[in-house]
Image (cartoon, rainbow, N blue to C red):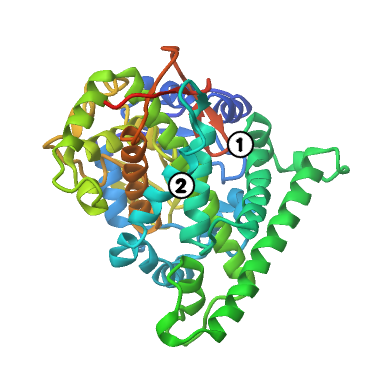
């Protein structure tokens, strides 16, 4: 027997307890898993995945996994993401087979990068200012609620091409109602235990979700139909640049575009992945900026040094602002886990042997809390990212490999511009009326603050 091969330990906790703890107290569960292990452990934490689950936070294993990703040894089958089908639909890129996923990714990636991304800069700043415009000196507001309004309007404008008006309000209300059902503790249980989603009437959670999904489908299909007609009537040199229009114009190598059902599921995927997650990350950022006045002061000093304070590209290149956003996403990653991978052929990674049928779950939360990578990991410290870059196997805020988040660049871009807009309000500054601590709490697939992050408007120039 080879002595250089490490044995994978097993978490000796009954599966039902693992499932409940992973759902209700995920960070405590991950810390329990890695308390006495080297970063690789066999678990039974997901009731929707095959039983041979391996949880990973070892950077060496993650690096090898990324290198093997998509090869003969490691696959990323969409079927392992089936839990998400109840939210994003069967046609979402998240659930596609590897071959279909690569093809769809080619269609969806261009609108989120390069010149298309830059086109959203001034728009994002204007929408943030618009959402804050009704606040008066002395007002105290819930940060998460305001951030949700901003990110929703960014999505509706950038993705759907909607601007302030009745159509935007209708879509916004319908989507908020649907997404709101899923963001509390009940929503978490409904996600992980599908039998609770049974429609027992309009009073039941299942009935409410069914009605909300039907309303969202009517609204999204209505937008798709209207946009198809508008594009047919528009001139070639007068095409809109919103993401829906770009997706309608996209075709694969055979000249085929996306069907209405595919567009519906992809649009809802963008809403689901790009609205709540970005709003939650911004809420955490505001929490830390007002808990750490030294960080806030240093960030404002960096902004004061900008030659052109209204240049979105110059803003997003600021090193300390980038470090602040990275640290927020480190300590509160958008997703706690990477999409699962499956071992197809026996493979050795980081000194561990993995066997066919093993389902590999990289724990981003646990990786980001490793003290060998991030000393004093529970402390909010943007300086970790000043003059230091981390490998794709060490910092996984948007995942890695073949299933990395398509909207990662847009999310980081949006976070930076919204934070700067809030910090540099023309006639106000924000303060926190409370120094109350905040712990992460599950909100569907993400972790949000357990207590409201409340900020107050103060009428004075800095």
What residue lies at 68% left-to-right and 51% top-to-bottom?
Answer: 174
Q: Please identify the quarter of the rendering in which residue 300 is found.
A: top left
In the image, 409: left or right of 216? left
Q: Is residue 351 visible?
A: no
The quadrant in which the C terminus is found is top left
Q: Nearer the viewer, residue 171 or 371?
A: 171
Q: Nearer the viewer, residue 442 or 365?
A: 442
The residue carrying mark 1 is 183
The quadrant in which the N terminus is found is top left
Q: Please identify the quarter of the rendering in which residue 187 is found.
A: top right
**Local crowd size for mark 2, using a 10 Å CA cut-off: few (<14), some (14–19), many (≥20):** many
Q: Position of residue 379 (x, y in %)?
A: 29, 20
Q: Is residue 191 above or below residue 22?
A: below
> Rounded to the nearest whole Å, what is the CA distance between mark 1 and mark 2?
31 Å
Q: Is residue 419 visible?
A: yes
Of the two numbered discs 1 and 2 in the rendering, the one whose residue sits closer to the viewer: 1
Q: Is residue 292 above or below residue 235?
A: above
Q: Residue furthest left?
A: 387
**Local crowd size for mark 1, using a 10 Å CA cut-off: few (<14), some (14–19), many (≥20):** some
Q: Position of residue 369 (x, y in %)?
A: 32, 27
Q: What element does badge 1 sit on? A: loop
Q: Point out which mark residue 358 bears.
A: 2
Q: Residue furthest right?
A: 201
In the image, 407: left or right of 150? left
Instruction: Looking at the image, tell me whether mark 1 or mark 2 is earlier in sequence order.
Output: 1
What residue lies at 47% left-to-right and 39% top-to-bottom?
Answer: 133
Q: Position of residue 96 (x, y in %)?
A: 52, 64
What residue lies at 64% left-to-right and 55% top-to-bottom?
Answer: 171
Q: Nearer the viewer, residue 460 or 148?
A: 460
What residue lies at 46% left-to-right and 70% top-to-bottom?
Answer: 104
Q: Is residue 100 above or below residue 140?
A: below
Q: Is residue 152 above or below residue 227?
A: above
């Amino acid at each position: 027997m080879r002595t250089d091969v490490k044995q994978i330990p097993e978490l000796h906790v009954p599966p039902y307890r693992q499932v409940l703890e992973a759902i209700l107290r995920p960070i405590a569960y991950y810390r329990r898993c890695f308390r006495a292990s080297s970063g690789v452990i066999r678990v039974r934490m997901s009731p929707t995945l095959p039983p041979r689950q391996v949880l990973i936070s070892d950077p060496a294993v993650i690096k090898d996994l990324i290198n093997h990703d998509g090869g003969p040894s490691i696959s990323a089958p969409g079927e392992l993401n089936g839990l998400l089908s109840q939210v994003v639909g069967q046609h979402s890129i998240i659930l596609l087979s590897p071959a279909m996923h690569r093809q769809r990714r080619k269609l969806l990636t261009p609108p989120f990068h390069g010149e298309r991304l830059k086109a959203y800069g001034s728009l994002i700043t204007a929408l943030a200012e618009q959402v804050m415009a009704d606040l008066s000196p002395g007002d105290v507001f819930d940060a998460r609620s305001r951030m949700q309004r901003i990110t929703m309007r960014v999505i509706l404008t950038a993705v759907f091409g909607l601007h302030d008006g009745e159509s935007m309000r209708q879509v916004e209300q319908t989507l908020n109602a649907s997404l709101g059902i899923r963001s509390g503790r009940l929503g978490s249980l409904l996600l992980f235990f599908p039998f609770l989603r049974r429609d027992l009437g309009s009073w039941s959670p299942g009935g409410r979700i069914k009605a909300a999904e039907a309303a969202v489908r009517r609204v999204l299909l209505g937008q798709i139909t209207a946009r198809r007609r508008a594009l047919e009537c528009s001139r070639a040199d007068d095409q809109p640049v919103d993401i829906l229009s770009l997706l309608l114009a996209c075709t694969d190598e055979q000249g085929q575009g996306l069907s209405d059902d595919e567009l519906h599921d992809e649009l809802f995927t963008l809403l689901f992945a790009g609205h709540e997650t970005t709003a939650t990350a911004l809420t955490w950022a505001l929490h830390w900026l007002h808990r750490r006045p030294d960080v806030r002061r240093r960030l404002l000093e960096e902004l004061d040094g900008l030659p052109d304070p209204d240049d979105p590209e110059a803003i997003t290149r600021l090193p300390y602002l980038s470090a602040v956003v990275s640290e927020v996403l480190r300590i509160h990653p958008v997703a706690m886990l990477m999409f699962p991978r499956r071992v197809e052929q026996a493979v050795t990674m980081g000194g561990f042997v993995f066997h066919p049928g093993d389902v590999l779950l990289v724990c981003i939360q646990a990786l980001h809390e490793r003290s060998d990578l991030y000393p004093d990991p529970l402390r909010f410290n943007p300086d970790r990212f000043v003059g230091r870059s981390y490998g794709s196997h060490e910092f996984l805020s948007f995942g890695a490999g073949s299933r990395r988040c398509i909207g990662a660049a847009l999310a980081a871009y949006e976070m930076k511009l919204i934070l700067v807009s809030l910090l540099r309000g023309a006639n106000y500054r924000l303060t926190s009326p409370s120094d109350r601590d905040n712990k992460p709490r599950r909100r569907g697939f993400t972790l949000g603050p357990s207590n409201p992050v409340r900020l107050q408007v103060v009428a004075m120039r800095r």
